[in-house]
Amino acid sequence: MTAESPIKIAPSILSADFADFGREINGLEAQGADWIHVDVMDGHFVPNLTFGPQLCRAIRPHIRTVMDVHLMISPVDPYVEAFAEAGADILTAHLEAGPHVHRTLQAIRGAGCKAGLALNPGTGLSDLDPLLDMVDLICVMSVNPGFGGQKFIHGQIAKVSALRRMIGDRPVHVEVDGGITPETAPLMAGAGADVLVAGSAVFKGGSADDPTPYGRNIRAIREAANAARTAA
Ligand code: DX5
Ligand code: ZN
């Protein structure tokens, strides 16, 4: 999970058919998804509502890869145990979600999950230093969280480069989330991201009945990202 770790594509099921998560996940994994990204929103930390631990528990048996749970909720701590019990492999909380992110990260690892820390586009890297040895993943949001299908914020590319330098040789994934397409993926991979979350760009043109477009879309993002690394 250095800048040289194989690129992972993590489709966000925010863009899936909400009446058919099981088949959607089966289709995504059959078509090459490396992780399944689950966007949890509370209508308070972000202006949208999605799902909670019960949904995570229900889809868990369908996920053979990695269940990557992105918590856009505040407070976080009262729910960590429930998401861990629901089978999350990675639990990512936002730095902006409360004053005690250190305690939140301890709780996530204490519950047996890998710990992730997400940063909104308006958040800098200055508070990260004391947290770098407590995380397995840092997620740089390249849109303001809340909705799929938003426009990529180019200013986040420099943040990814600076973050990768800060991480040094620590075993920490750099994930990017929001507006990732075959056009923007190489910009983030070139800057040092190794996990690319994509919703709209993966689901475009496909469905649970015909998931082959998911495969084409995943390959296009992966190939563009890998090409940027070779060029670097
Ligand atoms: C945004 C979510 C993202 C989102 C990505 O709040 O965290 O995971 O679903 O969607 P796209 O790829 O459509 O920007
Ligand atoms: Zn997300």
Image: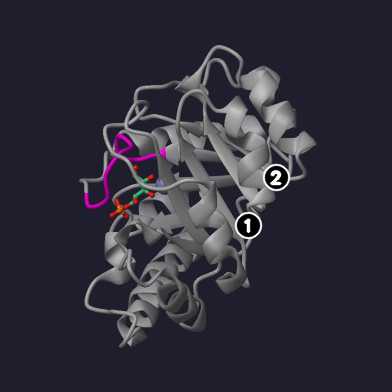
Q: Point out which mark residue 114 bears.
A: 2
- State which quadrant residue 63 falls in: bottom right
Alpha-carbon neighbours of circle 1 within 10 Å: few (<14), some, or many (≥20)? few
Residue at the top extreme?
A: 99
Residue 138 spot, x, y in % from top left: 56, 38
Image label count:
2
- Residue 200 versus residue 69: which sits nearer the camera? 69
Please report whichever mark, 2 or 1, sits nearer to the chain's N-terminal start: 1
Q: Contact, CB < 8 Å: mark 2 with mark 1?
A: no
Q: Secondary structure at mark 2?
A: strand
Residue 136 spot, x, y in % from top left: 68, 42
Q: Which residues are magenta?
A: 141-149
Nearest to the eye among marks 2 and 1: give it.
2
Q: Overall secondary structure of the magenta stretch?
A: loop
Residue 56 spot, x, y in % from top left: 53, 55
The residue lying at 70 percent from left, 45 percent from top is 114
Residue 191 falls within the magenta-colored stretch: no
Left or right: 106 as drawn, with respect to 3: right
Name the residue that disc number 1 marks. 4
The residue lying at 35 percent from left, 83 percent from top is 211
